[in-house]
Image (cartoon, rainbow, N blue to C red):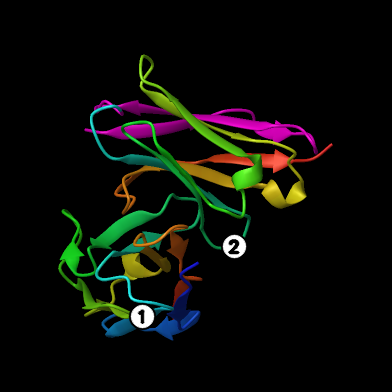
Amino acid sequence: QVQLQESGPGLVKPSETLSLTCTVSGYSISSGYYWGWIRQPPGKGLEWIGSIYYNGRTYYNPSLKSRLTISRDTSKNHFSLKLTSVTAADTAMYYCARDRSLDIWGQGTMVSVSS
Amino acid sequence: DIQMTQSPSSLSASVGDRVTITCRASQGIRNDLGWYQQKPGKAPKRLIYAASSLQSGVPSRFSGSGSGTEFTLTISSLQPEDFATYYCLQHNGYPWTFGQGTKVEIK
């Protein structure tokens, strides 16, 4: 079955770049679907960050667009998130998920922004 | 942005109760809406897609309805494992947006 797994540092310093990868197993990300990122600050609701379509086209939340890059490596069957100039407000659980309606989710990875 | 107004923000209910959660979209989104259940420390799980289609493996006590701007998630008979937080998501227009969530607690 299709599985998604997030990975990356759990602690990032303010003003630095947050980098996460979502590795997909059981399906080729270049075959179909949107592949996206969602985050959830502690005790708060969900926010869609952005997605990359199977053809490589990207879609970003305007609230993050100036700091955000989502890319993919089809040879490794993973897609990645880079968020620059992070602050404490970027502290959150970060999830990756498949498709527009987010049918399959990774387990999430907690990222804290702190010096 | 399309705003999703979800209500109530929380509710207390007993096992066996019928529970209804509503999401209103600030503009029409056809049926591009999903419902998700999240338990503490876990990733959200999709329950309903395309506003009214039941995700495979999800109990039939969950149902979704609506189209356009008003949507409803109904749990026909609340079970102990249903106590969780529920979110709606619209994926009709960018940015995709979630409702604020509804926490379903034990009465």
Residue located beneath label 1 in the image: B21
Q: Alpha carbon of mark 2 to alpha carbon of mark 1: how far?
A: 18 Å
Q: Position of residue A19 (x, y in %)?
A: 61, 30
The answer to which quarter of the image holds residue A1 is: top left
Residue located beneath label 2 in the image: A44
The subunit letter for the residue under badge 1 reads: B
Any part of residue A37 in sight: no
Q: How many marks?
A: 2
| Label 2: element kind | loop
Please report contact status of discs 2 and 1: CB closer than 8 Å, yes or no: no
- Start-end of magenta stretch: A1-29
Q: Amino acid at mark 2?
A: Lys
The answer to whether B72 is drawn above or below residue A56 in the figure is below
Magenta-span inclusion, residue A43: no
**Residue at far right of view:** A115
Q: Amino acid at mark 1?
A: Ile
Q: Position of residue B8 (x, y in %)?
A: 46, 83
- State left or right for residue A3 relative to residue A59: left
Question: Looking at this view, is B78 or A86 the one in front?
Answer: A86
- State left or right for residue A48 relative to residue A15: left
The answer to whether B90 is drawn above or below residue A91 in the figure is below
Question: Looking at this view, is A49 or B60 the one in front?
Answer: A49
The answer to whether B11 is drawn above or below residue B49 in the figure is below
